[in-house]
Amino acid sequence: MALIGYARVSTTDQDPQLQLDALATAGTARVFTDHGVSGTKTERPELDRCLDHLREGDVLAVWKLDRLGRNTVHVLQLIERLTERGIGFRSLTEGLHTDGPMGKAMLTVMAAFAQLERDTMVERTRAGLVAAAANGRKGGRPRKVDDTDAAKARQLKEKGIGAPDIAKMLGCSRATVYRYLSGE
């Protein structure tokens, strides 16, 4: 029997060290880590490798239940597959495990709350974007060239000046000049 860990961070600039430290403290023999992979994805390379590595009697440990996944159905199906293979499951932060019916019931409840949290976050983000758009703001990076400079770029192009030279004059990239010349 081995305690095997799985860690996941959603973006490549996040650091999984907190998870790795907690899993090491719990006594994991090995940890598989996905970097830059959303919990909403059902296919995660290191999770797949971890699942292939697990053997009957092993226990899969995660730092927190939402590291395993954000979709309740997927998390519960995954844990059910582990159980069918004789593999246990532990979530360190919540103190959840698949030992006994109470542990399984609590896993179901916590997985539902993890999905609720994700769905609420997505809903708030969408509402914020709609409110911002209603106020004339849009997301994304600010424009490098304003409308005056875009008009100037078109005038320079009409005079036969090439995009690389226009870019130097405006202090932007050639791609930006081409984008504004095409009317974007």
Image (cartoon, rainbow, N blue to C red):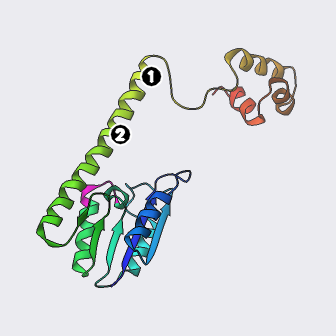
Is residue 156 depicted above or below 19 in this figure?
above
Q: Residues within 10 Å of mark 1 (few under 14, many from 20)?
A: few
Mark 1: which amino acid?
Ala
The answer to which quarter of the image holds residue 8 is bottom left
Taking the spot 36% from the left edge, 82% from the top edge, the residue there is: 2
The answer to which quarter of the image holds residue 68 is bottom left
- Report x, y in % for residue 144: 69, 26
- On screen, residue 96 versus residue 157, left or right, reads left
Is residue 93 depicted above or below 162 in this figure?
below
Name the image quarter holding the C terminus.
Answer: top right
User: Residue 120: which disc?
Assistant: none
Kindly identify which residue carries mark 1.
133
Which of 139/9 is in front? Answer: 9
Instruction: Give the secondary structure at mark 1.
Output: helix
Residue 90: say if magenta: no
- Report x, y in % for residue 97: 23, 67
Give the overall secondary structure of the magenta segment: loop
Is residue 148 depicted above or below 31 in this figure?
above
Q: Residues within 10 Å of mark 2 (few under 14, many from 20)?
A: few
Taking the spot 50% from the left edge, 25% from the top edge, the residue there is: 138
Kindly identify which residue carries mark 2.
122
Taking the spot 39% from the left edge, 58% from the top edge, the residue there is: 41
Q: Which region is colored magenta?
A: 69-73
Which of 86/155 is in front? Answer: 86
Mark 2: which amino acid?
Val
Instruction: Give the secondary structure at mark 2.
Output: helix
> How far apart are the alpha carbons under marks 2 and 1?
17 Å
